Amino acid sequence: MIASPKNPGASAPGFLRSPRRASRPRETRSPSHASIHAERVWQAGTAEWHPCSSPGVTRSPNVGDMTDAQDYFSRRLAFETDPSDVYAAQKNGDRFVLVDVRGDEAWAQGRITGAVHMPYRDIDDRAPLEIALDTPVVVYCWSPGCNAGQKGALAFARLGYEVREMIGGYEYWVREGQPFENDQGPCERVFDPTVMVVRS
């Protein structure tokens, strides 16, 4: 079943809201020779900063680079969520639709309990008829090695939906012990100690 809204006029659940942007750090001291060297080692626009290239240099990248990093991670958090947050939102009864964008065979083999099936190739035709435009959407595919979730998220975004991708996909949902099912019914839950704390 799809989680139904407790309050149709309420804002999106917490895990769907965009994070606040962190304030920019200030440079308060004149850079030393070592810090200037560290900034030169940092290649603008890449992740090739090597503080160990000069002995004793431990300074972070310059203000512009730090701001770029803040922008990058803020944008990721604005458009991604994870299995534990989605499961918490389901249990809270938050208003959103969880969409499995994989193919028919994948859906039959196993899917997240409470999800709806809409392969990413069908989203353009089906979504406007089946999901209200003001409903937040979360999409998922197989795993971190599958980009169907990104394709599905892009299709929803082009139609004007508020959408996030659930990173980790179906694989990490199952490994973290969340409920899942197949065409025969509910499946036995799995608790993988490599991705979560397992308590006896």
Image (tube, rainbow, N blue to C red):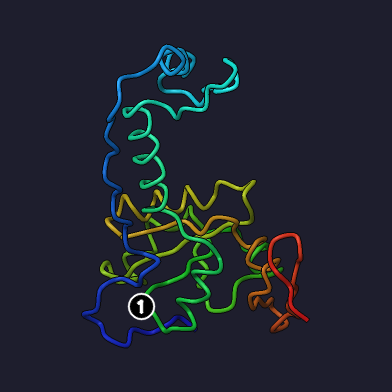
Q: Position of residue 159 (x, y in %)?
A: 30, 55
For disc 1, the marked residue is: 95
**Which residue sits at x=68%, y=70%?**
110
Q: Position of residue 9 (x, y in %)?
A: 21, 80
The residue nearer to you, when weighing 129 against 113, is: 113
Q: Secondary structure at mark 1?
A: loop
Residue farthest to the bottom, as pictured? 6
Quadrant position of the C terminus in the picture: bottom right
Above or below residue 179? Residue 172 is above
Determine which quarter of the picture holds residue 52. top right
Q: Position of residue 71 (x, y in %)?
A: 34, 40
Residue 101 relative to residue 44: left or right: right
Determine which quarter of the picture holds residue 73. top left
Q: Position of residue 186 (x, y in %)?
A: 69, 83
Determine which quarter of the picture holds residue 179. bottom right
Q: Residues within 10 Å of mark 1 (few under 14, many from 20)?
A: many
**Which residue sits at x=60%, y=56%?**
168
**Which residue sits at x=53%, y=22%?**
57
The residue nearer to you, when weighing 10 against 155, is: 10
How many numbered discs?
A: 1
Residue 191 relative to residue 130: left or right: right
The residue nearer to you, when weighing 200 against 87, is: 200
The kind of residue on which mark 1 rests is: Arg
The residue nearer to you, when weighing 150 against 194, is: 194
Residue 19 relative to residue 55: left or right: left
**Which residue sits at x=45%, y=76%?**
89
